[in-house]
């Protein structure tokens, strides 16, 4: 029997969206002199531990939430001083003239941050306002009332054996009930996906399309460090038909974030985003910052890239989707935290109004209406064609998007459409293999040493959270037709084809999982389902 707790508002996920929603609710309650109970649960062991982002941050939404964020000590320490956009060939680079860059590539007024640290700070602000914050608790199941509205979530059981039976340290999950529940699980949220299906939230929306971002944090030599420098690159090592690009962000304290994003609509099943990222660092323009430095951190995360036309309906009876659980990221700007914060604030305002009117578990129509009227909608509308243009290849896509933004200011009279990612793979036999160099252990690395840096851990005996709908598919289809692409698109070495006497089998090393969600997105038959593991497991990023 599970115990239950009641709240006015429950928030599932402690990233920028969830924390901003919680903070805004408490701010409004204080302004109006009302009592309001707000509970936020987060599956990571501590707030900020699962946060991974580029991250150049636009402070606009944060300034609306806390006009005095500087005085409060928010860790936005490094203002952007210079933008460089480079088109890479194998050995050379051509810089795009800054005067021709679209507005979305200009970062004046933004900050290079360690988003995990910003989120940790937001968590402190939320707790100071009276939000009940519970890290280490994963939202595992959606709860519905008799009328079919969402009435909250149940947290996952702790201490289950691998077969799902209670172990010696078993603790049943809690039921958390609320008048409204906001889901802020990040990109490809496990419960968000279920809500989209149950309430048909994707009717009329384009399929969501994604990238995978792989990132390392380096400490570099002082003479190679330029605080505030933002470098974005396109081209090598990707072929011209595959969407993707890299970044190098110079933070404070001789820290440099280097990362690479691969669009998950790629066609060649031999492609490995992890290896592309490692190869990327060997380019002379990137190597020059890192040589002689030390790699401190590693992480990976899927990124929602579809933009405005891929947003689902945001509300349903009893709650709403906020942040990247809905897909608010602006792929053209390579930014999502400002959008997450704003969406959380808009949903909080709608929920507060409803509670003040003594409503509960109805549909918060005021939230999508406020979004439609917001600067966030205007921003996403301006860049809505970015991902569809980039499907046309690097040079054609860049040219078309440049014309769209520079000449038409994002006001072209057409909206192009997105397609899903999982069905884009070609058979392995139709594609050339890619010869990735072996890691040197100095500049380039293997997956296992990388996962080690992410501090990833799961209780060994818990049920596997990477579930197969049909156990025969990985061999009969994925291996036979696509040469087991899950071995390559997973950035943590979770999936491995093992040769046994009875023939090949798929081994799932779930302990390595960094919760990036790429397998759930890219599996060609949608046979892999990512479900929530025990709370407190996964990566523990130190300010990524």
Image: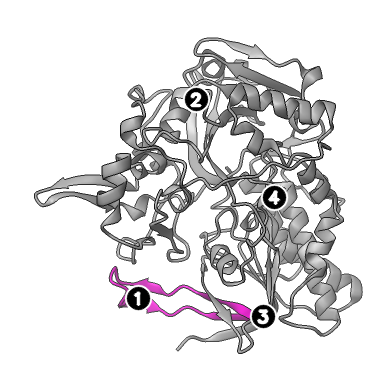
Task: Please state which of the two labelled residues, at mark 1 or mark 2, is closer to the viewer.
Answer: 2
Closer mark to the observer between disc 1 and disc 3: 3
Q: Which of marks 4 and 2 is in front?
A: 4
| 96 lies above or below 47 | above
Q: How far apart are marks 4 and 3 (CA)?
A: 30 Å
- Residue 365: x and y in percent read 79, 70
Say if mark 4 contacts mark 1, CB within 8 Å. Answer: no
Please, what secondary structure does the residue beneath circle 3 have?
strand
Q: Which tag, 2 or 3, sits closer to the chain's start?
A: 3
Residue under the point 54% across and 66% down: 191
Q: Distance between the residues labelled 2 and 3?
A: 47 Å
Identity of the residue drawn at 53% across and 23% down: 240
The correct choice, above or below, for 540 with respect to 169 in the image is above
Callout 2 secondary element = loop
In this rendering, does residue 83 appear at all? yes
Q: Is the Cβ of the residue at disc 2 closer than 8 Å to that at disc 3?
A: no
Q: Which quarter of the rendering shows the C terminus? A: top right
Could one spot residue 123 in this view of the protein? Answer: no
Q: Mark 2 points at which residue?
A: 238
The mark lying in front, picked from 2 and 3, is: 2
Cα distance between the residues tagged 4 and 2? 26 Å
Which residue has dot 4 on it? 309
* Tag of residue 103: none
4 or 3: tag closer to the N-terminus: 3
Tag shown at residue 169: 1
Dot 4: what SS?
helix
């Amino acid at each position: 029997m599970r115990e239950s707790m009641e709240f006015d508002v429950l928030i599932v996920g402690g990233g920028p969206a969830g924390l901003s929603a919680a903070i805004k609710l408490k701010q409004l309650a204080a302004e109006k002199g009302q009592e309001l109970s707000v509970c936020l649960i987060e599956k990571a062991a501590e707030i900020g531990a699962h946060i991974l982002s580029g991250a150049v941050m636009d402070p606009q939404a944060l300034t609306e939430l806390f006009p005095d964020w500087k005085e409060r000590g928010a860790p936005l320490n490094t203002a952007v001083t210079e933008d460089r956009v480079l088109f890479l060939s194998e050995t050379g680079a051509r810089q795009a003239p800054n005067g021709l860059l679209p507005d979305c590539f200009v970062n004046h007024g933004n900050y290079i941050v360690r988003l995990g640290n910003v989120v940790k700070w937001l968590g402190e602000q939320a707790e100071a306002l009276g939000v009940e914050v519970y890290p280490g608790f994963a939202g595992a199941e959606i709860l519905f009332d008799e009328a079919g509205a969402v009435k909250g979530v149940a947290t996952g059981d702790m201490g289950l054996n691998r077969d799902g039976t209670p172990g010696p340290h078993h603790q049943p999950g809690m039921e958390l009930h609320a008048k409204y529940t906001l889901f802020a699980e990040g990109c490809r949220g496990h419960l968000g996906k279920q809500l989209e299906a149950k309430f048909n939230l994707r009717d009329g929306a384009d399929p969501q399309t994604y990238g995978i971002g792989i990132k390392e944090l380096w400490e570099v030599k002082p003479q190679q460090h330029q605080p505030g420098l933002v470098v974005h690159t396109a081209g090598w090592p990707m072929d011209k038909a595959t969407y993707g690009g890299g970044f190098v962000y110079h933070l404070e304290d001789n820290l440099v974030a280097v990362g690479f994003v691969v669009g998950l609509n790629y066609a060649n099943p031999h492609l490995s985003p992890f290896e592309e990222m490692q190869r990327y660092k060997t380019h002379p323009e990137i190597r020059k910052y890192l040589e002689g430095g030390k790699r401190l951190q590693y992480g990976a995360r899927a990124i929602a890239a579809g933009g405005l036309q891929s947003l689902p309906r945001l509300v349903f009876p009893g709650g709403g989707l906020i942040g990247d659980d809905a897909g608010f990221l602006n792929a053209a700007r390579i930014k999502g935290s400002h959008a997450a914060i704003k969406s959380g604030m808009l949903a909080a305002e709608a929920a507060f109004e409803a509670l003040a009117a003594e409503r509960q578990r109805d549909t918060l129509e005021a939230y999508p209406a406020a979004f439609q009227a917001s600067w966030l909608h205007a921003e996403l509308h301006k860049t809505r064609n970015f991902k569809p243009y980039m499907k046309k290849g690097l040079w054609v896509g860049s040219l078309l998007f440049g014309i769209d933004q520079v000449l038409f200011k994002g006001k072209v009279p057409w909206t192009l459409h997105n397609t899903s990612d999982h069905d884009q793979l070609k058979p392995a036999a139709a594609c050339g293999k890619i010869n990735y160099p072996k890691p040197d252990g100095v500049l380039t690395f293997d997956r296992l040493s990388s996962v080690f840096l992410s501090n990833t851990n799961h209780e060994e005996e818990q049920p596997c959270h990477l579930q197969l709908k049909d156990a025969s598919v990985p061999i009969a289809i994925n291996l036979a037709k696509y040469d087991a692409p899950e071995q390559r698109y997973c950035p943590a070495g979770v999936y491995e084809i093992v040769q046994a006497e009875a023939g090949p089998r798929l081994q799932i090393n779930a302990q390595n999982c960094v919760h990036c969600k790429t397998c759930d997105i890219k599996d060609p038959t949608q046979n892999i389902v990512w479900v929530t593991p025990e709370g407190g497991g996964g990566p523990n990023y130190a300010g990524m």
